[in-house]
Amino acid sequence: MNDDMVLVLNSGSSSIKYQLLDPESGVVAASGMVDRIGEEHAGIEHQVDGRIFEHRGPIADHAAGLRLVFQMFAESGHDLAAAGVRAVGHRVVHGGEVFYQPTLIDDAVVAAISELSSLAPLHNPANVAGIESARALLPGVPQVAVFDTAFFHGLPGAAKTYAIDAKLAAAHGIRKYGFHGTSHEYVSGRVAALLERDPAELNQIIFHLGNGASASAIRGGHPIDTTMGLTPLEGLVMGTRGGDLDPGIIAHLARSAQLSIDQIDEMLNRNAGLKGLSGVNDFRELQRLIDAGDAAARLAYDVYIHRMRRYLGAYLIELGGVDAITFTAGVGENSPQVRADALAGLSRFGIDVDPDRNVAEDRVARYISAPGAEIAVLVVPTNEELAIAQAAHRVVTAQGAG
Ligand code: ADP
């Protein structure tokens, strides 16, 4: 193992995803996931050189999970404590107004990320747990926080402002923050490279369609709008989140169905979207149901596409014309049907998907627009881990840390 590797950690409420990778070549030395932390049937799947190592049994908390991961690294030939990891890069979901670039972590930064938990109660506490565990296990290694909101920090006032009582909004940090920023930034850079154009000259729309989903409108390398908002609930239809809805629904449910705010929050996060409409949140399962003639699954799919097209239209106008439309993440990279349906019938706007290119199963960044089409339509695999590793590496190199 060379001594310029970065360990990337993505700590969720009951999971830790990780990769050890070379930020220059992108080569992944090892990767894995701790799952169901705090539950009886927890486990770790650790992959190195095509081999899979497994651990089953209860894992009390993030610290215990990460300790076991370090043991598995050692047993599989990469002793992290001994081998000199250059940096640890942490995905942190919410940076609020405080953090808008990759930040070297110290006690004050940890405290500030923790304070932002009111804006992201499901995510930031887990991120802090991951950071504290990693700091304890690798005390000499610089740790860098990379924020999911950072790319959208400079959204224009008209796009980031909710039209509610301005004083109340200011007192409670209410604005559109946007999420998936690491992915939107990475993919927009790859698009410019693929088009061999200066990012400063390009207008782009990006659809990041994974379990969570968001779209962004990017002018000259800077986002001017995005679908997610104060929280990752706004915008597109997702696996378990419904995206945009009339805020009156929340008050109506509280009164009429006697649901508490926490119950409504739970429903909106975990039991809405494709799951709420069809019973399944995974897109492949949704497709199987549709193929079997399930009407609820069909409607869920139609709502999903309808929402995408609504934002496509909005962003085309906001940008005043677009050079490239790009699909990324699990659904965006793998579902030709979604790409075709989202862009169907838009030839008069210069948008033409080539059917053969669209169904090609290449795993690389590629065009799916027809040759000579006015607007480039692309599929670009996202790689948030690589982007986080590169950001962490830049920070430690610039600051002479490590
Ligand atoms: P996350 O947001 O957790 O990173 P991903 O980007 O991995 O999620 O996307 C997960 C989604 O991608 C799931 O809904 C999954 O069904 C969908 N997906 C993965 N492969 C395919 C495929 N071949 N066809 C359609 N959907 C797919």
Image (cartoon, helix red, strand yellow):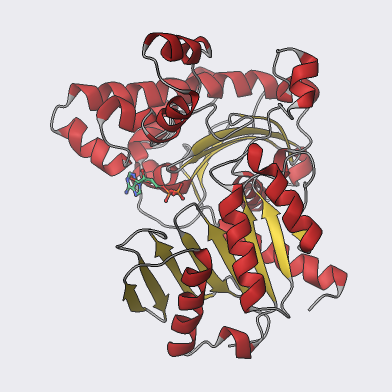
Q: Tell me if residue 175 comes above or below residue 201 in the rendering.
A: above
Front residue of this view, candidates 370 and 146: 146
Q: Position of residue 189 (x, y in %)?
A: 67, 50
Q: Position of residue 324 (x, y in %)?
A: 60, 36
Q: Tell me if residue 167 comes above or below residue 203 in the rendering.
A: above
Residue 284 picture quarter: top left
Q: Position of residue 23 (x, y in %)?
A: 64, 71
Front residue of this view, candidates 210 and 27: 210
Q: Residue furthest right?
A: 399
Q: Tell me if residue 226 comes above or below residue 77 in the rendering.
A: above
Image quadrant holding the N terminus, namely bottom right
Q: Residue furthest left?
A: 292
Residue drawn at (58%, 70%), measured in percent from left and top? 26
Residue drawn at (33%, 35%), measured in percent from left and top? 337
Give the tally of numbered discs.
0
Residue drawn at (20%, 31%), measured in percent from left and top? 290
Q: Is residue 42 left or right of residue 122?
A: left
Residue 102 makes an appearance in the image = no
Residue 192 makes an appearance in the image = yes
Q: Position of residue 108 (x, y in %)?
A: 80, 57
Q: Is residue 45 left or right of residue 147?
A: left
Residue drawn at (58%, 41%), measured in percent from left and top? 121
Image quadrant holding the C terminus, namely bottom right
Front residue of this view, candidates 27 and 343: 27
